[in-house]
Amino acid sequence: MGICRKKRHSTEEKEAVFLRKKITLTRAIALAVGTMVGSGIFISPKGVLKNSGNVGISLLVWLACGILSLFGALSYADLGTSITKSGGHYIYLLETLGPLPAFLRLWAEFVMIRPANMAVVSLAFGRYLIEPFFAPCNVPPLAVKLITTTGVTLVIALNCWSVSWSANIQTVLTALKMVTIGLVIVPGMMALGNGHYENFHDSFDTTSLVIEKLPLAFYSGMFAYGGWFYLNFVTEEIVNPKRNIPLAVVISLTVVTVGYLLTNVSYYAILTPQEILNSDAVAVSFADKGFKSISSVIPVLVALSCFGALNGGIFAASRMLFAAAREGQWPALFSMIHLQRHTPLPALILMLPLIYVMVSIGDLYGLLNFYSFARWLFIGLVTLGLMIHRYRHPEVPRPFKVPLVIPLVFTIACFFIVGMSLYSDPVNTSIGCAITLSGLPVYYLVVQKTRIPRCCTSKFNAMTVKLQILMKVAHQEVQTY
């Protein structure tokens, strides 16, 4: 009887609808490294150099961004091992600062941050993939956008199909990313070994340094490291998160910071600062000048690197919408999971339309500055919330507890960068602020206490049921936190 009952329980759990724990330590490292090493290291050097003014300070910005990202990731690891729900920034704001900041973060994420971020990565994917076919001519913008939208659609379809497939492809693409970075580092180190130091002369010449532009340099640098927080979006799907989240964070950020510094040194060993500033695809310019024998391969490898970052970002971000719907701050349909595939299908599909809109805009650096304000404001609020939560709830078990100085330094840095950006780029920053605040009436009219007429609510519920049947999705049946 005991064996029969055990078998029945096992079968019921196998058939139940919930997100499985399929992210091992290896997959967690691959997700973190794979989402950090995307388009950033191949497009951000131009933005960092342009706004830092010289080679020496640009390298210091890259190192500072790595250390800051490690501080942020360690703070998030503290939160992720004590608040065990998936959802990342949204859940931590909800648990530490309350429902309004959490909803504004969610609103900014859906309307602005996620579509713009995915557009930046996917446009880099499209540009690098198609560049070799048009060389030496300029690539038509329309061709880049068509390839980009195809890539985004493919990634969404892959994530809808299988968690395991997405995770395995992420692991393979992460290995390819490290090969790509290696192919950039080796010729650069060889050039330095042969005495090519000319691009490092007067590295700290401050005549071209404009202090108020430094936050924009940090935006570009932090964008390249963006991805260290994605593990916290999928906490419920990580095997042994109390051990594997901190381990994955430390390993991945150490690897990426060292890799980024060596890659930038290699860029400067081969290309002059002016050549970097004139290039729309730094890695391609680097390969053309320093590694001609395989210069046609580099853009393809970079495109695959961007594809991996796109895959990891979409995989993680869909869990935020899923978590918000489960908490009642987003329509219930988006908290549902496919009956056979066990993927958050509605949350994934919802991201497509706005990504297409952002892709149609097509301005990489404009998009980067546009969404960075809201992203870093809310990340700073999350680490502020960690300190407040530690003070208010000392009794909460914390399997991984960081010294308070780490979130304090990170919070101050985030708020400083955000504050300075209001002065450096007031137009894009103001647009980002306005879009974030546009969530206030939505929260007070719909979320906090619904003021929608009953007839509209009943129609909305009927539509939800029809979509549920069409998509073959249902609510989670097993609690995973």
Image (spheres, helix red, strand yellow):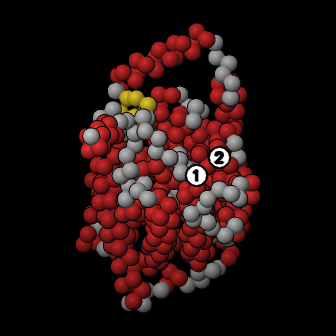
Residue 254 coordinates in the image, percent (x, y): 48, 73
Q: Is mark 1 on a helix, strand or loop?
A: loop
Residue sticking out furthest to the top: 455
Q: Pointer 2 and pointer 1: residues touching (CB < 8 Å)?
A: yes
Tell me, for residue 95, which label it has, or none.
Answer: 2
At 35% from the left edge and 79% from the top edge, which residue is drawn?
A: 186
Q: Name the residue under label 1.
A: 83
CA distance for labels 2 and 1: 8 Å
Q: Nearer the viewer, residue 187 or 315?
A: 315
Reply above or below: 285 against 425. below
At 41% from the left edge and 47% from the top edge, which residue is drawn?
A: 315
Residue 246 coordinates in the image, percent (x, y): 51, 65
Q: In this view, does 74 lie to the left or right of 260?
A: right
Q: Which amino acid does label 1 sit on?
A: Ile
Residue 154 visible in image: no
Q: Nearer the viewer, residue 188 or 239?
A: 239
Residue 101 coordinates in the image, percent (x, y): 68, 42
**Sequence order check: which comes first, mark 2 or mark 1?**
1
Reply above or below: 264 against 384. below
Label 2 environment density (alpha carbons within 10 Å; few <14, some 14–19, many ≥20) = some
